[in-house]
Image (cartoon, grey):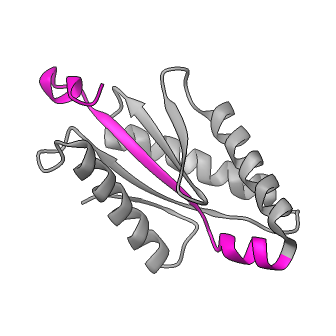
Amino acid sequence: MLTEHPRYDRPLSLLLLDVDEFKHVNDDHGHQAGDAVLCEIGRIVREAIRKADFPARYRCDEIAIIFPDTAIDQAAVMAERLRANVCRYFADTSPRVTASIGISCIHKPDTTTAIELVRQAGKALYEVKRSGRNSVGTSA
């Protein structure tokens, strides 16, 4: 699927959603609470995305979402909606949970492989985490 997008000049975006300070959720509320948080975030993601999009758990507390035929600016709109939905759902709960999201796009000239797509999204996510969390960042 990834190789078709550059060949046919179609964008493909990747979101990496990370639960902010997830270790504290597990440490302060237990691993069952952490599992419940991840299940709810998974539900929020599934309800928000299109049928053509592909979500998957990535690492411990990250969710990767592939958005075919989606430019980075469109993916940023979806990412902000997801981030806001997570905040809204957990606003009055304990633990209070927020999410940080990094985005990259295969359609950019310097992002042409799956490895580079993941690296760029990870870099954008790292910048969001470094600058305060609970926001969305795109690869430059």
Rendered view: 30 above or below 49: below
The quadrant in which the C terminus is found is bottom left
User: What's the magenta region?
Assistant: 1-28
Residue at 29 percent across and 58 percent down: it is 119
Give yes or no for residue 15 being in the magenta stretch: yes
The percent position of residue 133, horizontal first and vertical second, equals: 55, 72
Rendered view: 102 above or below 126: above
The quadrant in which the N terminus is found is top left
When asked about the image quadrant of residue 90, the answer is bottom right
When asked about the image quadrant of residue 7, the answer is top left
User: In this rendering, would 82 be left or right of 101?
Assistant: right
The percent position of residue 5, horizontal first and vertical second, equals: 22, 26
- What count of labels does the image hold? 0
Give yes or no for residue 53 being in the magenta stretch: no
Residue at 72 percent across and 52 percent down: it is 38
The percent position of residue 75, horizontal first and vertical second, equals: 42, 41
Residue 91 visible: no
Q: Nearer the viewer, residue 110 or 81?
A: 110
The percent position of residue 123, horizontal first and vertical second, equals: 33, 65
Residue at 75 percent across and 46 percent down: it is 39
User: In this rendering, would 64 be left or right of 124?
Assistant: right
Residue 37 visible: yes
When asked about the image quadrant of residue 4, the answer is top left
Rendered view: 75 above or below 52: below
Residue at 16 percent across and 25 percent down: it is 9
User: In this rendering, would 120 be left or right of 134?
Assistant: left
